Image: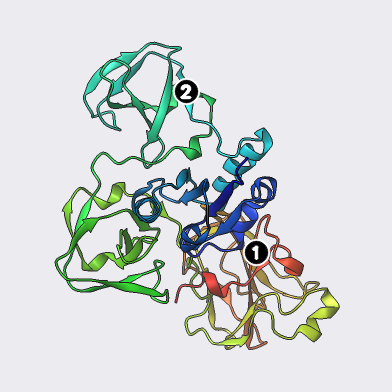
Amino acid sequence: MSLIRHILLLPAGADWHWMEASRFYVERFRVIPTTNPEIALSLPGDPLIVSLVLPDGRPGHTAAWLRQRRPSIHLDLLFAPTPERLQRILDARTASGARLGRGLRVITTDRLNVRSGPGFSSPIIGRLEAGTEVEVVGQSADGAWWAIVDPVRRERAWIAAAYTRVIRGIPEMVPVLLARPPRVRARDPLLVRQNPDLRAPILGQLPEGVECEALGQAEEGRWIQIPFPDAAHPGWVLKENLEILQGTLEELPGYPSERWLRPPVRSPVIRRAFGADPVSFAAWGLPGHEGVDFQASPGEPVYAAAEGMVVMAAERLDHPYGTQVRIRHRRPDGVYITVYGHLMMGALEVRVGEWVRSGQPLGRAGPQGFIHWMLKKEGARNGAYGDILDPIPYLYL
């Protein structure tokens, strides 16, 4: 019996959240997790399985790159825009003992129109009676439509997902299919980066006038993902330097931005970094400072780092952070809490239950000359810090 070599190829730049999401699957089936596609080319022998995690659900560039260099490879495609989605897929496989899972089948819950495209404005090309079982081969970017093989015409067709019930498989495993992928052209020579961030590594340059397909967009709308032949993973370019030739960018799958927090003060100068002063914080059972202290003159305005719901706005003389505000942020990859401590008594400008926008004033800095800013994530396991994370990698400057 041949040894099965199996790689779990995570998205470029995947952090510990993705590794934690795949832990039980990796241990159960002895899978090698990595973000480096070159690993798939270096392992000797066959069979070789690569479970390719696709944040936008489309195999496209990376799959083609792998197949071209190793034609015998078996690709297992996983649609997982967030670590939580990936964990749901892999935990279901682990529980059932199925290394590669099973296809998705649904049954119609009502008489259903079959359309030529994913939308109620698309022409009707047939009908399915209630109780009809069909296999799903794809889904729309918003997940509202299933792509099926029309049992009469034997070609791709679309049905509304709301009028079906899943009877086998995991919806998140189904790839996203775009009826007409947008095409763009570079107005100027563009730097192609590994992630949608000006600080991300540069993969190369897209020459002026080159046309390509748009694959996805970053959450804040400034970056577009494109195929890039010189790298195994797709790259990112600034949207402002692209000309749209075909389709619309609004239909593209969206990627959660890794940097989504704004500094809580206008001129951010760090007084004490995350993890600093390990000796002082050992008394609290922490390996170091559990947040970031920003310099702030007494009375200086303090702002919300992102939109969210205020869950605490209180003057806490009994608490190390004193007068403080806490904001709950629901993100595609989970729920976060930002904490703003050492604020001025009697100067809070928000109340519990209020929805605040990014940059909205919360209060003013207290007499200490700094504010304590902290980031927590529900369910996170960041070593001895527990659910507390270093906020700097999430900070958008």
**Residue 306 percent coordinates (x, y):** 50, 64
Q: CA distance from mark 1 to mark 2?
A: 38 Å
The residue carrying mark 1 is: 376
Examine the rendering and report whether any part of residue 310 can be seen: no
Horizontal side of residue 179 vs 386, given as left or right = left
Examine the rendering and report whether any part of residue 266 can be seen: yes
Question: Looking at the image, which is closer to me, 20 or 293?
Answer: 20
The residue carrying pointer 1 sits among few (fewer than 14), some (14 to 19) or many (20 or more) residues within 10 Å by Cα, namely many
**Residue 56 percent coordinates (x, y):** 41, 49
Residue 180: image quadrant is top left
Horizontal side of residue 81 vs 31, given as left or right = left
Question: Looking at the image, which is closer to me, 345 or 103?
Answer: 103
Q: Identify whether 394 is placed above or below 227.
A: below
- The numbered mark, 1 or 2, whose residue comes first in the sequence reads 2
Which of discs 1 and 2 lies nearer the camera? The answer is: 2
The quadrant in which the N terminus is found is top right
The residue carrying pointer 2 sits among few (fewer than 14), some (14 to 19) or many (20 or more) residues within 10 Å by Cα, namely many
Horizontal side of residue 182 vs 32, given as left or right = left
Q: Identify whether 150 is placed above or below 228.
A: above
The residue carrying mark 2 is: 106
**Residue 199 percent coordinates (x, y):** 42, 77
Query: The disc labelled 2 sits on which kind of residue?
Result: Val
Q: Identify whether 380 is placed above or below 268.
A: above
Question: Looking at the image, which is closer to me, 79 or 366?
Answer: 79
**Residue drawn at point x = 54 percent, y = 72 percent:** 393
Say the numbered circle drawn on residue 312.
none
Query: The disc labelled 1 sits on which kind of residue?
Result: Lys
